[in-house]
Each structure stands twice: as C-alpha cells, then as structure tokens.
Amino acid sequence: MEPFRQHKGIVAPLERANVDTDAIIPKQFLKSIKRTGFGDNLFDEMRYLDHGEPGQDCSQRPKNPDFVLNREPYCNATVLLAGRNFGCGSSREHAPWALKDFGFRVLIAPSFADIFYNNCFKNGLLPVVLPEETVERLFRAVEAEPGYQLAVDLPAQTVTTPSGEVLAFDIDGFRKHMLEQGLDEIGLTLQHADAIRAYEERRRREAPWLFRA
Amino acid sequence: MAGRTLYEKLWDDHVVRDNEDGTSLLYIDRQLVHEVTSPQAFEGLRLAGRQPWRTDANLAVADHNVPTTDRRGGIADPVSRLQVDTLDDNCRTYGITEFGMNDPRQGIVHVIGPEQGATLPGMTIVCGDSHTSTQGAMGAMAFGIGTSEVEHALATQTLVQQKSKTMLISVDGEPGPGVTAKDIILHIIGTIGTAGGTGYAIEYGGSAVRNLSMEGRMTICNMSIEAGARCGMIAVDDTTIDYIANRPFAPTGEQWEQAVAYWKTLHSDPDAAFDRVVHIDAATIQPQVSWGTSPEMVVPIHGSVPNPFKETDEARRTAYARALEYMGLEPETPMTDIWLDKIFIGSCTNARISDLREAARVVEGRRIADNIKLAMVVPGSGLVKKQAEDEGLDRVFKEAGFEWREAGCSMCLGMNPDQLSPGERCASTSNRNFEGRQGQGGRTHLVSPAMAAAAAVAGHFVDVREF
C-alpha cells in the first residue's frame, strides 16, 4: 500500500450529508473483478448526464456541468470536503478504490460511516474527521476562493489552511501507523500465526462444533 | 466482576491477542463469500502467494448478479457472468464449499447462512457485505467488511478490530396488529437516525423483540447498518435454539448438547452496562413507509410527506428538499395518496418464508391494480422458494398477477436485470432507498411485505390494517 505522510492539494466541496457508497460508485461498476479503473465512474450518476455502464469511454460521455468535479480547478482536486456520515450504506471497497483512482488522497468530513472509514485506511486514503462547525467554515472558505488548498500532515495530525491556521484531528494509533508506513496488514498479522494456532487449539477443545468440516 | 454485555462476551471469546495500540486480533469463525466483493481478495492471495488459513470456515454463494428468471441458459450479461465464473473458479481452486447458481440451496448469502445452520450463536461471522449484520439475530457477532478485510480473513482467519461502544435498544410492549419486524426497525432508524448507531454494536432486547420469530429478528438485525451500526445482535433463547436444531451444518449428538449449554450463556448479564440505552414503546409503532432517499426518512402510513420549509435545521431542510425533488413528491402529500409503478417483495431483509406468507395472506383472492406495471416476489433462497411452492404461495402470488422468480438479491440493488427505470416508483421490502439504488432515477419506498402486498392490490400505499 502507498504510504501517506504529508499531502497538500486542491479542495473539492461536496456539501451534502449522508453521501452513500451507491452514490460514490454505482452498482453496475461493481461487476469488475479488478481493483483499479473505477475513477472515471466516481459519482457516476451526479457526474454524467447519461446512464453509465462498465466499459464505456467516459471522455465521450455528456458531463453534468454543474457537478463540482467537472469544473476547473476541482477536476484536479485531491482533497474532498464533504458533509456528515460520508460513505454510509454498502460495504463496497470499490468506493475508496474509485476515490483514490480519481486522485483523492484526503477526505474531510464531520463524520464517516464505520465500514467506509475502515476501508479507506486499507487503500492509502486518509479520512479526516473535523468538527461540524470547522467543516462548515472550510466550505465557506472554499466557496470564496476556487483553488483553495489544504495541507495535511498525518504524523503531526494537522490540517493547515492557506492563512496558516492549524486544525488538529484525532486518529487511532494503529491506523495511523499502518498508513504512515504503508504496511501490509496481512503480513503483520501472520507474524502472530503461532498465537492464532494456539487460540484454535484451545477453542477446538472448548467449542469443537465450530471446527466441523 | 461487573456483568458483561452480549457483545463483550462474544468479543472476549474471540480475542487471539491484544495489541499494544488498543486494537485486538479477533478470530473469525465463519466467512461467507459472494461474487461481488471477493474476486480482488482472491487475486490478492494469489499475488502474495498465500493460501486460505482454513477453507472449511468459508461458505460461498453467488447472489448479487444472478438472474431471477429462467437460469438454464446461464447469465446473459458477459460482465456479470465473468464475476460469477470467477467465484466458481476461486472456490474450486481453494477448495471452498460453494452453492452454485443452480444448486437448490443457492440464495442470498444472509438468508442461506442461518438457513443452513452455517451461522451459529457465539460465532464471529463476516462477509464482504454490509447486511451481514442480519446474522447477529443468532446471538452472534456478525458484521460487514471491505474486500481488503475479506482477504485478511481468508489469509489469517482473523481481523484486527477496535472494540465498539455498546447500545441497547429495548422494544417493550405489544405491537399492534399489522405491525411487523420491518416496521419496528424502520421506526428505530427514524428515531435514532442513520448515523445513530455509528461506532456502536447494537443489541436489540425487550419483550417485543423476544416475542419475534427468528426470521423477524433477522429483519431487525439486517437493518442495523442503516442505523449506522456494523453489527446488531439479539440474545440466545429457546426460539434461537429451536430454529437451529437439525439444520444441515448445525452440530449433532454430544456436540449439540455441549453447544446448547454454551449458547444459553449468550445474553447480556442483568448488571451489564451499555454506553447508550434507547427505549421504544412497541404499542406506539405504526406500519411505516419511507418517503425520501435515506432510511431515516420514514413516517407512519397515516403520516404525510414532510414540508422542508417547516424544518428549522438548515442541513435537514436542504436534504429534505433534495430528497423530495428526487422522489418527485410534493410536501405534505398524504402517504396513502402516493401511487406506485412496481412492487418488489424480496431481499435479505424480507425474503424468508414468513415474509412470503404475510404477503400472500394479503393478496390471496385479489388482483394487483391496473397501474402496477410489475409486481415480483423473489424468494431469499431456493429452499424458501420450494417451501413456498409446497404451501401453494406461488399460486396465490401468480393468480394475483405477481411474477414468481428465482432466488437472489435482485431489485434490492439491481446488479442483475431487475431494475427500476428512471422515474418509476416502487414499494420495496428491501433496506435502502438511496438515489439510484434500484436503478438510475428509480424511486424507492421501504415497507414491510404485508404493506407492499396491500399497495400492489390498491395501486397506492394503504394501511394494511384497514385492508
């Protein structure tokens, strides 16, 4: 996984609460058996005026001129600012895959849905939770200044505005460490293979019905 | 020692090791695998040269992409076909038990887990699907995960997890006639909101929950994720144990006795403390209908579409206005004045035999209204379908003008050809009314099976109690 330490980029505002993973990447694109190539279909129903299907050349499709990611400079955004409960609904990891594939590295919202939040960390995407009032203030700042950029520092756990205001955020130690180092979580867990085997041996005695073939 | 909640008991029994950073490595007893969220996980195993840790802990089935019409010709859409073929190939390669598309046991993953006795009380159960929470009804810790975690569980039989906070939702009293498990959970979501359960593991209790059948309990736990919680669970009692007895994957003989003794400990202790407790009076719950594009946008059948201009909270006003525009509804329209185009009875929320019985009772001897373009029943599994046919329910539905289909996820999310067209309005027994969920531009109203059946006959929403 790509490590994440510092990042600075253009902020795209998506001022809506409860953006669900069906909206982030609609179902028809979930038929792919790959992890890549979802970026062109990110927010497909909001982004294009026609009906999207897998395998289309999206550069030829009619775009919704009102959708933020279709406008300069937001088409080059790498930081997404969103409303509360972002990523609710389906557990599809295709949602963070699509956001990452489009070019996003940081998501900022007052809250995220649990499964989506967890999925982001597996893909080098940093979800940052900031208080609702702060996010509201950032929306106004972005609105006033297209091309507004934020600088995010994971080790320091800060977001810095162009005026130099520093906003601190919380993140749990394990997720921070994994993302900073870009570590292979399965590889790390397998270092505890003996503990897993010992657990299984004990459990097999206590609850043998769990081990029926 | 202070008493423990059910969640804490399940957690404690599955800790392989506590990590220094406050997370724990949790053992996973059962992983259910379907075609949409697994191909990249198997690909990851292959690229890393890893093998599944324990193949017998996995059970696979294709459900999202499968056609619900005649399957003898296979899957017409080549992209869907490749995904289902990929699951078949992966299961063959790694020796994982799979119910193939034409196996009579095939069905929606969350229906077949309990139906087969493959998901049992006390288990940790995961699947790359948010509605895995359904199976917490067994007295288990069941939660949805992303594909990276599917791969992690395949490779290590564990997941790195952070303990959730605990919430008890206690539903007490006697629900009125015509009020089903679906109405209870829709009412709960309307009360606590779609993010009300975020960060929590929910336990449902109270007399109204204890009096539900296992199938009703599964309907409740199913929609925990719509309340923001990854898992919902219900304590084990005789109803649970009676349900499991004699199912194909359930333990037998001496192991059955041993298992039952353990399962009977799977309830929250009387002195256990929850981080949050919500009390709901079952007697106040009416049959529910959703009006908007989030499951919390729900009102009783005799309610009306809200008026966004009367909302004081600005975010809510904006969200309501947007939802009404998408849904093509005017503020303050009585729910009973909303006319429908399609009816969908199915999904992991409401496609078990008791759901089909409830719906069939309403439509028996009646016909669907002329304005209904399509009314379909999609059983949750091949075995549910067979049971329904043995009881003659298929005939009841067909005589009323319903289509009787093969098992799968179908129009709940429309990954197969079962979809709404733009602007079409559907009464659906599924779990999500998001924009575009059942088809681009489609308008979904969430209801119970009985309410969907009554709406099919009337052509618009009606109170099933007056029907």
Image (cartoon, coloured by chain):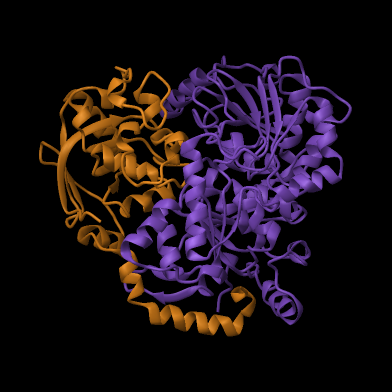
Chain colours: A orange, B purple
Give the quadrant of the C terminus of chain B: top right
Rendered residue at 52%/47% (across/down): B84
Decide if residue B341 is on the left or right side of residue A31.
right
User: Closest to the observer: B192 or A66?
Assistant: A66
Q: Is residue B142 above or below residue A89?
A: below
- Residue lying farthest to the right in this orientation: B365
Residue B365: in sight, yes or no?
yes
Q: Name which residue lies at 45% across and 26% down.
A: B319
Residue B1 horizontal side relative to residue A119, left or right: right
Q: Nearer the viewer, residue A145 or B39?
A: B39
Residue farthest front in this picture: B73
Q: Is residue B389 left or right of residue B303?
A: right
The percent coordinates of residue B171 (x first, y second) are 69, 50
Left or right placement of residue A140 versus residue B128 in this view: left
Q: Which quarter of the rendering shows the N terminus of chain B?
A: bottom right
Q: Position of residue A202 (x, y in %)?
A: 53, 84
Residue A26 falls in which quadrant of the image?
Answer: top left
What residue is rendered at 66% in x and 34% in y?
B69
- In this orientation, which residue lies closer to the viewer: B193 or B23? B23
Of residues B424 and B416, the one nearer the viewer is: B416
Q: Position of residue A120 (x, y in %)?
A: 33, 49
Q: Can see residue B278?
A: no
Give the answer, above or below, for where B330 lies relative to A191: above
Indicate the quadrant where residue B380 lies.
top right
**Number of marks present in the image shown:** 0
Residue A213: x, y in percent?
Answer: 61, 73
